[in-house]
Image (spheres, rainbow, N blue to C red):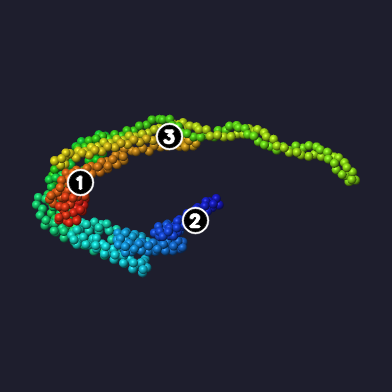
Amino acid sequence: MTRLLPAVLLLAVLGSACTASLRGRADKLAQEGRFVEAATLYDDLVQQSPHEKELVTERDGLRGRALDQLLGNARRFRLQGVDEKAEEDLLQFLDRRAQWNSKLNGGLESSLLEEMEGTHQHLRRTISTPASQGLALTADQMLTRKQKLLAHREMAVIQREMSAAVLQSGRDVCKRLRDVSSEDAPHWRELVSRYCRRWREFAPEPPPAAELLSVPTWTGDVDGLDSAQMELLRGRLTRAFESSPWFSPSARHHPEMSLAGRFASRRDSHTVSLTAPYSEQVPYTDHEDRTETISEPYSEEEEYTDEEGKKRKRTVTKTRTYTRTITVPVTRYREVSRTFEYHALRLSVDHQLTVSSSGVLDSQRGPLATVFQDHLSDSAYEHDVSFGPGNVYPRRAQLVDPEPWLEQRVEQIVQRFAQGLREHWHESYCTTPARTLDEAARCARAGTALPTPAYQVLSEVLGDDAAHAPSLFATP
């Protein structure tokens, strides 16, 4: 126990020093008015010393100041007419209040009610108003943006009101869209069906348009991939096709898509000679001049007076001092550059992948072709040699395995294939001006921003919601 005491004391001193440092940082943040960050650091302090009442009191005080600051910022932005900024701070206030389970004093409760009323008015303008104008998609986009704020229990009443307004708007528009003439317009009818489904209303789904296709059949192989890897690749590409504008589960025609390419992974190892530079202190003999002081005795006669007053002489010994310079040998050291030679095993891997897919999706155009190529070379040394002066220590090679590398490349292939499908649809059906609702709805299937002609056609029925029509095709 006696031997452990110094270590225990050292840990206590270090712990106390860390606490003091953390508290100093927290207090500095508080002095700078950054109360949220200061309170967060005091959370750590209280966690380390939960029984120190002073820390708990200081933390609770900082939490109160942080909440007051956040709500004050929200009120200030609201009075300036910057509603979005106000609601960002209100969201932080509500998040922190819930996290800290804080009780509010009367002043903060009053300010919160005022800020909630300001938020209510703003959301009525940005959600309820467009909803009442039949712009349910526009209103729903704003409602989605505000979901984190409206999810707080304090906002439950406002959330229900906004959601009800958007839902009712969508249902009303659905009824109107169902009455729009849609003979020989399968794309428009599918847009209406998706629109109504979004608001839990029914609109009959039309038979698939002639341009739509079922799951593709795959031919060809990628050399170097086994049957399981090929099955994985085909399956991932098929799922990408099912999420594309080209797909309809009811379509009868299965496009034929071909795959080709090659995957090769090569490993190599051979022994190599390596050198590590280092410096060595080498002794050598040098000479240096030194000065020494010599004390030399000598004899001299001096006169003195004896007790009878007579002059007499006697011999005395004295010392004289002088210096002299001598040359002495000394040992010195100089740094000499050396190299340490040792043997290691050089391991290397080389992964190469090329995959191409091709198939005709639009009979009026050439085939959709996507090509993916990637290559990785990696190498490392492996040995058990140790030589401290040259900073040489045992090493183990950690090279990129082919399986995870191939899995990442497959994901990139799928992403490129999906992008190519969207672009191919857009080039087929969005590059010529849309003249009818069906042509405009067909273009919207691409899921990208509508070109001006398609937007103008759809806006005659959907108004400004036409800009959000592509979002209806984001999900099946």
Any part of residue 54 in sight: yes
Q: Tell which of 305 and 89 is nearer to you.
A: 305
**Mark 1 and 2 residues: CB-CB less than 8 Å, in contact?**
no
- Taking 223 as reference, is 320 left or right? right
State which tag comes first along the sequence, 1 or 2.
2
Residue at 34% over, 67% down = 111
Q: Label 3: which residue?
A: 383
Tell us which disc is closer to us: 2 or 3. 2
281, 476: nearer the viewer: 281
- The residue wearing badge 1 is 244
Residue indicated by mark 2:
16
For residue 421, above or below residue 164: above
Which one is earlier in the sequence, the residue at label 2 or at label 3? 2
- The image quarter containing residue 105 is bottom left
Q: Residue at x 39, y 33 (%)?
A: 346
Callout 3 amino acid: His
Classify residue 458 as left or right of residue 45. left
Label 2 secondary element: helix
Give left or right: position of 384 versus 129: right
Q: Are marks 2 and 3 in contact (CB under 8 Å)?
A: no
Give residue 289's position: percent from left, percent from top: 64, 34
Quadrant housing residue 396: top left
Report the Cα–Cα distance between label 1 and label 2.
61 Å
- At 46% from the left and 61% from the top, the residue drawn is 52
